[in-house]
Every structure is written in C-alpha cells, then in structure tokens.
C-alpha cells in the first residue's frame, strides 16, 4: 500500500535545493541569475526550481525513480492501472490516448461536440471519425450526451470500429451513461476512452457522476489543472488493465517534450496528494457553493442556472453539480455579451461565454464572498443592460456533413477563398469559438449556409474565433475542386 501523504517529486526538489549544485546544464537562466526580470516576476524560489532532468530528479521520458513513484501514487489515487504525468496540457493527454488505440483508416466512434484536441489527433493519425450526433436542449441551445440507442446504432453500422470516445462530462456538466457505453464497447471488442478534462473531481468527491476508471474505461485524460489545483498545462493520462503501459509511453514520447518542467511535475505531485487527503471535503464545499449560486442566480429572474433537473436517464444520464452554467437568453443578451460585461464592468473573469450561456468555473480555490459578488453583478447586468431576446441565436450544435477524413482534408491540395464564397465547399481547416474549443467546422466537412450564418453571428457578438490560417477569419482554406 502506497502512502498518499508522500509527494516524491516535491521531496526530491526540496533535497536538491540543499545540495548547492553548480549548474553547467540547461536552462540557461542558471537558477535565475541570468534573468533578473524573470526572478522579479516569479520569485527566486520558483525560478530556482526550474531545473533540467538529472539522476536525482528522474526523467519523464523514462522514469525509474521519483517520477515513477509519483505516477504509481497517482494511479492508486485515481483507481487506474497506471498514470502518466503530462506536461503538454490535457490536449497532449487526449491526443496520446487516441493515438494509442487507432491508426490510419481505423474508425473511432465519438460525439461531434468533442474538443479540438480529439480532431487534431485524427489529423495526426489518419483515423476516421464516426459521429454520434448528440441530442440538443432546445431551450439552452447546448449539446447533450450520447444516447445509448445512438451508440448501439453506431456500433451496428460500424462493427469494425476500434474505439468509442466519451466526454465525461461536457463543458456544461452533461454526462452520458458511461458505464453502459463501456460495457457496449467491450462487448464488441472496442476500447472505451474518456475525455475527462472537466472531471478530475469525480474521483474524489461524493455524490458525483461516475469516473472513467470506476466505470471500467480503458483510458482517460484528466485535466488536473482545471478542478484539481495543479499548475496550468499539467494533466494526467490514466489507463486500465487492458492497455499496455510501455506502448502508451512510446506514443506519449512521440510528441511530449524531453525537457519537462519540474514546476508542472511537482504541482501534479502536490495536487494529487492534496486531493487524496482532502479532496472529499473540498469538493463537497464546491458542490455546496455551486448549489447556493444556482439558487441565487435563478431568483434574479431572466437567467437560468441549470442543474440536475436536466437528468433524463439517457442523453443526460447524470449532471456535474459543481458546474455553474447559466443561460442568458431571457435577459436579451448572448452569453458572450454577459461574459464581456462581467470582465469589463465588474472585474470578474469567468471561464467562457458562448451564444446563449456563460460558465463560471468553480473549484477548490473559490470563496463564498466571490460568488456573492458574481450573483450581485449578474443582477445589475440584467437591470442595466437587459432587453428583449427575440432575435438571439441559441442553437450551439450543427450536424456535420463529413465528406473526407480530417487527415485527408487537412493535407489535401487547397485554396483560400473569401469566407462568404465557401458555401458548398469542403473545409481543410478548423474553425471554433475558444473556449470551449468545440469545432464549428473541421477538416473534411461540408461548409453550409447554416454554418456561415453561425460564424457571422458569433463574430458579431464578439466570440473569440480560432483555428483558420487567416487570423481575421475573412478567408477559409477549402479543398480544390476535383480533389
């Protein structure tokens, strides 16, 4: 039995500080002496711990000592067969997960409302997506989960598929019936993967939706820096008993840096210890704060902070009650407009605003008094800026028309056209509002009038649109005619 009170990487760094080692290695700032401005910004202690891999500190590419111990502790804490510490964000974890189970020409079943990292993995490996189009909530304009009947149909239509990928949960807190999907996948010889970028707390909190490892999934990408408290860009990749650890390590090493940041690694180590020892009570408080905020926001009028009442046993099998997602359309403002007002007028930075919703991301570092400030600011925004919302667009999901695989389209011969001239053409690039980072259009998909209207509306409302080669979003790359 491992001791979750240990933090091997942190302990090794503390010992290293006492050794007074003279650095003739990288990084070149030499414990900050070569960059005093950086020391002034981050502090001497932080910069002095920005060191390179060496024997006392192990090596992330081939861990045999303190990093290996930290991985074993994380695996035990999360109920996995093994855990990999990731320093390229959950994007790196998601892409390593996908690349580990599918290759060029293989099919993978997944919802279309996946993060851009999944689509990026398909561009890299050449796998072919089989989309389970999620149901949508008409009032909220958001995508829901994967219904079991839709998954069964996708399996029946594509029995040769290698894997099924599930969001657990979505950005908005929606959970599919993960355990049943895992059972379906395994019964048909497929792997089940979970994008748990927003589900770290499922492993430690009580009365939470089921975690991927508890549901029997084969792999899960867990974003520790979101709700787990570690530094930005640090993440975990978890695997089950049916996945070969050594092969996954090889896949990770194809793209992950050979100069891993010990600031990120130690933050993962310390945060895992914190969650293992205190996560249960910490997330109980987060859930309590979210419930309080939902009640207060709904009492303002016009806003709808939704919760577990959405559960229908299928496309919303469960709901993450720590998610404070609020629909804004009834006050006559798009979510992105409320997002901007909160920041510009009230100095409140929330996670994102889309066309119809905002998300205030709650975690272990939030305070009740800050929530009270958010609630009072939302009430004032309604009073000062509210108006009729009859002309607001609310639909967040558009069924894609897939013509080519993401890899084929991304690398195909292409031409750049003014965006208004691309209707009926096949996109060779991504376009998305970020956050949340779900592609509006992906390589290989047909550009329709509906998509172009959506893009124009999102631009007018001030959404941050990313992905295309043209940063101004006035042109799109499309496949040349005849390709």
Image (tube, helix red, strand yellow):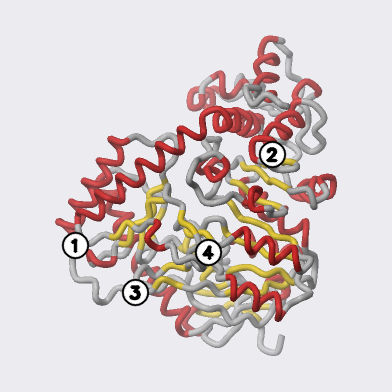
Give the image quarter of residue 325. bottom left
Which residue in the protein does label 1 denote? Answer: 386
> Label 4 to label 3, Cα distance in Å?
17 Å
Q: Position of residue 209 (x, y in %)?
A: 52, 51
Q: Position of residue 349 (x, y in %)?
A: 36, 46
What residue is rendered at 69% in x and 55% in y? Answer: 95
Callouts 1 and 2 close, C-beta under 8 Å = no
Residue 20 visible in rendering: yes
Which residue in the protein does label 3 denote? Answer: 393
Q: Please tell me whether residue 86 is drawn above or below residue 394 in the rendered image.
A: above
The numbered dot on residue 19 is none
For the residue pair 39 and 214, the one nearer the viewer reads as 214
Q: Is residue 337 left or right of residue 210?
A: left
> Label 3 to label 2, Cα distance in Å?
41 Å
Q: Is residue 316 left or right of residue 403?
A: left
Q: Position of residue 390 (x, y in %)?
A: 24, 76
Give the mark nearer the N terminus: 2 vs 4: 2
What residue is rendered at 78% in x and 70% in y? Answer: 106
Which residue in the protein does label 2 denote? Answer: 85
Q: Secondary structure at mark 1?
A: loop
Which residue in the protein does label 4 denote? Answer: 438
Give the mark nearer the N terminus: 1 vs 2: 2
Give the mark nearer the N terminus: 4 vs 3: 3
């Amino acid at each position: 039995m491992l001791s979750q009170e240990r933090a091997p990487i942190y302990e090794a760094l503390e010992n290293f500080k006492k050794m007074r080692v003279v650095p003739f290695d990288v990084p070149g700032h030499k414990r900050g002496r070569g960059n005093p401005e950086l020391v002034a910004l981050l502090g001497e202690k932080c910069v002095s711990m920005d060191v390179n891999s060496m024997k006392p500190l192990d090596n992330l590419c081939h861990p045999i000592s303190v990093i290996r111990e930290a991985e074993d502790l994380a695996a035990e804490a999360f109920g996995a067969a093994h855990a990999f510490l990731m320093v390229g964000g959950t994007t790196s974890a998601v892409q390593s997960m996908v690349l580990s189970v599918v290759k060029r020409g293989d099919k993978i079943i997944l919802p279309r409302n996946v993060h851009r990292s999944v689509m990026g993995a398909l561009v890299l490996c050449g796998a072919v997506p089989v989309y389970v189009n999620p149901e949508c909530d008409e009032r909220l304009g958001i995508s829901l989960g994967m219904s079991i009947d839709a998954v069964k149909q996708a399996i029946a239509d594509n029995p040769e598929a290698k894997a099924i990928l599930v969001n657990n949960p979505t950005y908005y807190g929606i959970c599919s019936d993960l355990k049943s999907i895992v059972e379906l996948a395994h019964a048909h010889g497929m792997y089940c993967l979970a994008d748990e970028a927003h589900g770290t707390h499922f492993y430690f909190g009580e009365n939470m939706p089921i975690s991927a490892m508890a549901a029997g999934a084969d792999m899960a990408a867990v974003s520790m820096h979101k709700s787990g408290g570690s530094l930005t860009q640090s993440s975990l990749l978890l695997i089950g008993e049916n996945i070969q650890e050594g092969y996954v390590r090889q896949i990770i090493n194809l793209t992950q840096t050979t100069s891993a940041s010990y600031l990120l690694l130690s933050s993962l180590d310390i945060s895992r210890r914190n969650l293992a020892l205190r996560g249960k009570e910490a997330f109980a408080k987060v859930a309590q704060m979210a419930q309080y905020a939902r009640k207060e926001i709904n009492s303002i009028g016009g806003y709808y902070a939704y919760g577990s009442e959405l559960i229908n046993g299928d496309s919303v099998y469960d709901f993450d009650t720590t998610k404070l997602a609020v629909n804004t359309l009834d006050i006559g403002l798009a979510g992105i407009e409320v997002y901007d007002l909160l920041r510009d007028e009230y100095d409140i930075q929330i996670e994102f605003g889309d066309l119809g919703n905002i998300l205030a991301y709650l975690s272990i570092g939030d305070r009740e008094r800050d929530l009270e400030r958010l609630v009072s600011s939302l009430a004032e925004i309604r009073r000062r800026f509210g108006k009729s919302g009859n002309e607001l667009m609310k639909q967040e999901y558009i069924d894609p028309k897939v013509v080519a695989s993401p890899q084929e389209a991304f690398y195909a011969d292409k031409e750049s056209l003014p965006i208004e001239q691309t209707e009926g053409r096949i996109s060779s690039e991504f376009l998305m509002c970020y956050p949340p980072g779900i592609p509006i259009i992906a390589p290989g998909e047909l550009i329709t009038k509906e998509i172009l209207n959506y893009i124009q509306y999102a631009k007018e409302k001030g959404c941050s649109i990313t992905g295309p080669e043209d940063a101004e979003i006035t042109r799109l790359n499309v496949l040349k005619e005849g390709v």
